Amino acid sequence: TAMDAGAHRGRVWKVLIVDDEALVRDALCAMLESTGCYRVVGSLARADEAPQVARSLSPDVVLMDVEMPGRSPFDSARAIRARNEDAHIVFLGAHVHRRFVREAADIGAAAYLTKSDSGSAILAALERVVSGERVLSTLDEGVEGTSDDAADRLTARELEVLKYISHGLSTREMAELMFLSPRTVERHVERLMGRLGIRDRLRLALFAFAHGLAPSPTVGGLSIPARERLEADAVSVGE
């Protein structure tokens, strides 16, 4: 067990948790500290702060959500590993998407887990991680989500933009969340449309829903303001 592993090594592993959901942060903290093998030294709601906090706290493990507002978690993870190659980066996703897993592997992450995994499965994976193993077997087993080549080639940033579009956010709102200029966001949107052969935001949202890249399965599942924004955008593009 993870507890036996920690006792055998005679140390307590320092963990930094980065997730925009307070409930998830609290649950992870309680689970980890209950084992006696892990001490949560920091708990953050945004990836933006993670590199600086990791630099000062020197965590052994960084548990980080793959989908958060603001700076890309993958960019933050790269920054952390650039200063501390010994830090074990463990990504947590709401679901397994091929692009996320591959990007995690590319930056040298130790594991990619899902929030639907049981507590015992997460602890077992962490035991392997602190032992020096990598838990990225989903790369070889096949993953959920689209097998569409175009969707599979999207970058983490493009997937983030696609998610915000599916939520009906305006360019300015996306820019504020991502700490980018509106023009830069527009360029991301234009590249998305070009890459996917889609001409408006409503159809981008439908694409995201159809391929499991956004949580809501239909446009009807959007809030009324979000749906109105997407429909207005589609009308303006068509005129």
Image (cartoon, rainbow, N blue to C red):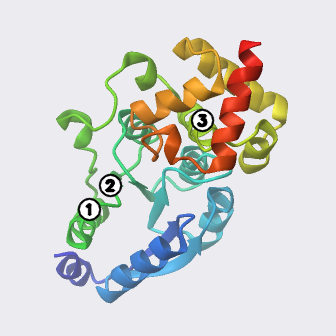
Asked if residue 169 lies left or right of residue 212, the reply is right
Residue 80 rendering spot, x and y as whole percentages: 57, 54
**Which residue position is annotated with label 2?**
113
**Which residue position is annotated with label 1?**
117
- Residue visible at 52% across and 50% down in the picture: 67
Above or below, 147 against 205 in this view is above
| Front of the two marks 2 and 1 | 1
Above or below, 38 against 82 in this view is below
| Quadrant (top left/top right/bottom left/bottom right) for the C terminus | top right
Residue 238 rendering spot, x and y as whole percentages: 71, 14
Q: Nearer the viewer, residue 88 or 147?
A: 147
Secondary element under disc 1, as helix, strand or loop, is loop
Amino acid type shown at disc 3:
Arg
Is residue 12 visible in the rendered image? The answer is no
Label pair 2/1, CB-CB below 8 angstroms: yes
Disc 2 residue crowd, few under 14, some 14–19, many 20+, Cα 10 Å: many
Q: Nearer the viewer, residue 208 or 134?
A: 208
Asked if residue 46 lies left or right of residue 86, the reply is right
- Residue visible at 28% across and 85% down in the picture: 35
Amino acid type shown at disc 2:
Leu
Number of marks in the image? 3
Label pair 2/3, CB-CB below 8 angstroms: no
**Distance of mark 1 from mark 3, alpha carbons?**
25 Å
